[in-house]
Amino acid sequence: MSMNDARTFPTAPRGSASRGLANWLKTGVLLAAMTALILAVGQALGGTTGLKIALVFALISNFGAYWFSDKLALAMYRAQPIPRDRMPWLYEMVERLTRRAGMPMPRLYIIPSHTPNAFATGRNPRNAAVAVTSGILQILDRRELEGVIAHELAHIRNRDTLIATIAATIAGAISGLANMLQWGLIFGGGGDRDREEGPAGLLSMLALIILAPLAATILQLAISRSREFGADATGAQICGDPHALADALEKLERGVQLFPDDGHPATASLFIVNPLSGKSLLRLFSTHPPTEERIRRLRAMRIYG
């Protein structure tokens, strides 16, 4: 066993309690925000009746976002479990990294996509999964892939995955609700609200259609950027080679420009690099910090011990 393999991280790092509390508070704020938006859309679509229906839907959505957001994210990208006998080397790599990080082994999935990328999901380290695309396996060597996997394990270890996956789920729900509101407006939705508020009700519906998806994106901006820097630093410590992750990020940034994935913009924040194409309007509000800055910080890191 090498010195790098022998080094492990403490199971309760300094600041983990405060970080955990902060994540719980963020989760509560997100669920409250989703409830408020769902209620607003319900009232806009159906007045008092729509508000009551929306309340039931919000309660169900909150429950589902907490317990099943990881499964929804994996299903959205048609991720399939990786059998151990198919990629034993990948299991050995992840097992080595999890031993060093002092954390449980996550489930491993593969996404059938040419876009080179990866993400982690799960409400806690014991219920976590790491998904890699087929594209990332084609362009990274094993040293670089180890840096990427370490980054995703860092998200799990830092307990970022619950807040990130819920944020992505909420963003998708908000976008869907905005579309519902748009069609409801086209086909004369609004019911009691139209009669009670007249032009003012119509203007508020238009505002919701425009501002709700934008609010979801801004919410993800606030959550995602700082956690990417943190996962880069922790991941570099786990794998013991900051340059491996830096080299991987350079390749991934070029790869997503060649093979972008604009299919699910609401979940772009989950991935290690932004999968959206440069032409996408949402890339202007990227949930990721500039890749160049991430690489610069990694190359400036020194790992000792």
Image (cartoon, rainbow, N blue to C red):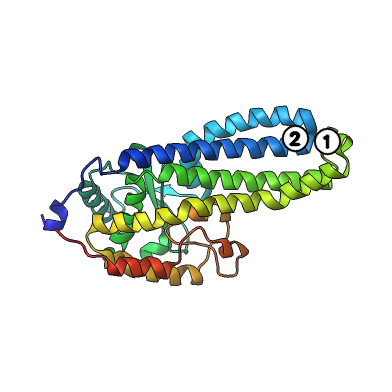
Can you identify the residue that label 1 sits on? 193
- Residue name at image x 57 percent, y 35 percent: 32
Please tell me which of labels 1 and 2 falls first in the chain. 2
Q: How many marks?
A: 2
Q: Is residue 90 left or right of residue 62?
A: left
Residue type marked 1: Arg
Residue 9, horizontal then vertical, whole percent: 21, 47
Residue type, numbered disc 2: Gln
Q: Which residue is mark 2?
A: 43
163 relative to 94 in the view: left or right:
right
User: Could you say where residue 53 lies in the image, as x and y percent from the top left?
Assistant: 70, 29
- Mark 1 is surrounded, within 10 Å at the Cα level, by few (under 14), some (14 to 19) or many (20 or more) other residues, namely many
Residue 300: which quarter of the image?
bottom left
Secondary structure category for the residue under label 1: helix
* 3D distance between C-alphas at marks 1 and 2: 7 Å
Q: Residue at x 42, y 41 (%)?
A: 23
